[in-house]
Image: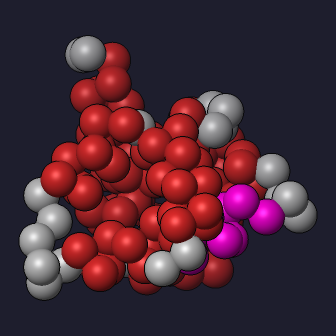
Amino acid sequence: MNKEKFERGLEIRKSVLGSEYVNKSIQNADDFNMPMQELVTEYCWGEVWARPGLPRKTRSIINLAMITALNRPHELKLHVRGAINNGLTKEEIQEVFLQTAIYCGVPAAIDSFRMAKEVFDEMENV
């Protein structure tokens, strides 16, 4: 593991997803899944998200579209929060999901709208 990339990834991951979520993920990791936490933090966040070629807001848009296409509701909810942290508005998130309805299918987009609404409601009640 590259400690420098891991630390940079940890910083970005916390900035996007929230320190509470990331800390809990790392603290709850055990011998079985800690290697996955390290891999995701180092390569996903410390390597790709740290690249200067795209702003975080754009990366969030891409993630929302791809996660919708893959139909991964847990990850979608997490990245809706991250997208808001990266400056996306509800209207921009709405547009991403409308676009995915055409290219990924209406059922996938409907699920994404449902998951995003849950996140918006949770965030308003905090």
Q: Is residue 66 left or right of residue 51?
A: left
User: Which residue does the image show at 60% across and 62% down from the upper left?
Assistant: 4
Q: Is residue 48 above or below residue 90?
A: below
Residue 45 counted in the magenta span: yes
User: Which residue does the image show at 44% across and 73% down from the upper left?
Assistant: 40
Q: Position of residue 47 (x, y in %)?
A: 66, 71
Q: Position of residue 29 (x, y in %)?
A: 16, 66
Q: Position of residue 61 (x, y in %)?
A: 66, 57
The one nearer the camera, 2 or 126, is 2
Q: How is the image coloured?
A: secondary structure
**In the orientation shown, which residue stands out farthest toward the right?**
53
Instruction: Using the rendered image of the protein, determine whether residue 17 is visible from the camera's viewpoint.
Output: yes
User: Which residue does the image show at 53% across and 67% down from the upper left?
Assistant: 3
- Residue 97, picture quadrant: bottom right
Q: Is residue 101 left or right of residue 59?
A: left
User: Which residue does the image show at 40% across and 37% down from the upper left?
Assistant: 18
Q: Main secondary structure of the magenta part?
A: helix
Q: Is residue 68 above or below residue 104?
A: above
**In the orientation shown, which residue stands out farthest toward the front?**
3
Number of numbered discs:
0
Q: Position of residue 121 (x, y in %)?
A: 29, 27
Give the magenta part as a residue range.
43-51
The one nearer the camera, 111 or 88, is 88
Instruction: Using the rendered image of the protein, determine whether residue 91 is visible from the camera's viewpoint.
Output: no
Residue 89 counted in the magenta span: no
Q: Quadrant of the C terminus?
A: top left
The one nearer the camera, 59 or 21, is 21
